[in-house]
């Protein structure tokens, strides 16, 4: 079984993926726009308005070895990511700091990067799209 994150960016999907490409080295593995749908929708999903044909219907991208999926959804407004964080494990303190700072560009630091009892580096940041990230370089387990 595999559990994957599916992020709905409400009209900012392509912008978000480009940000993750630059900040985290994300690699796009697939992107389809609503206009490329082989079975075009007459109306929007769940009774909503028809989506912008140029918006992203579905995308897949990899950050490191992890595959994430994303969409513009119906593009109905500001995306909201509540009650969930993505955790990013870095191989060194320097890399943790670099990744944290890249995600913080235009975002909001929720917990500054610092040493903790469980990590030589740990911090929490909400990126410019509102996605919450925990960046960690964990201490070795005893």
Image (cartoon, rainbow, N blue to C red):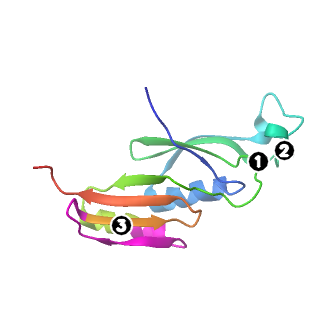
Q: Position of residue 86 (x, y in %)?
A: 45, 52
Seen from the viewer's position, the closer of residues 16 and 74 is 74
Q: Are marks 3 and 2 in contact (CB under 8 Å)?
A: no
The residue indicated by pointer 2 is 48
Please name the residue shown 46% across and 54% down the image: 85
Q: Which mark is residue 74?
A: 1
> What residue did someone put label 3 on?
123
| Side of 26 relative to 15 (left or right) | left
Magenta-drawn segment? 100-120
The relative height of residue 33 versus residue 100 in the rendered view (above or below) is above
Query: What's the distance in space between the residues labelled 2 and 1, CA to CA?
Result: 7 Å
Where residue 124 appears, x then y in whole percent? 40, 65
Q: Position of residue 110 (x, y in %)?
A: 44, 70
Circles 2 and 1, Cβ within 8 Å, touching? The answer is yes
Farthest residue toward the front? 83
Question: How crowded is the residue under tag 3: few (<14 C-alpha within 10 Å), some, or many (20+)?
Answer: many
Q: Sequence order check: which comes first, mark 2 or mark 1?
A: 2
Label 3, secondary structure: give it: strand
Residue at far top of view: 1
Q: Find residue 131 and name its label.
A: none
């Amino acid at each position: 079984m595999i559990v994957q994150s599916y992020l709905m960016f409400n009209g900012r999907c392509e912008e978000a993926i480009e940000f993750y490409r630059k900040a985290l080295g994300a690699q796009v593995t697939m992107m389809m726009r609503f206009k490329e749908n082989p079975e075009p929708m007459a109306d929007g999903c769940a009774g909503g308005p028809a989506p912008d044909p140029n918006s992203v219907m579905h995308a897949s991208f990899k950050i490191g070895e992890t595959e994430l999926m994303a969409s513009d959804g119906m593009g109905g407004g500001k995306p909201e990511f509540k009650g969930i964080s993505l955790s990013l494990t870095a191989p060194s303190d320097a890399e943790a700091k670099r990744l944290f700072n890249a995600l913080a560009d235009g975002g909001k630091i929720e917990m500054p990067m610092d040493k903790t009892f469980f990590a030589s580096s740990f911090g929490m940041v909400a990126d410019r799209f509102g996605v919450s990230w925990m960046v960690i370089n964990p201490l070795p387990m005893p």
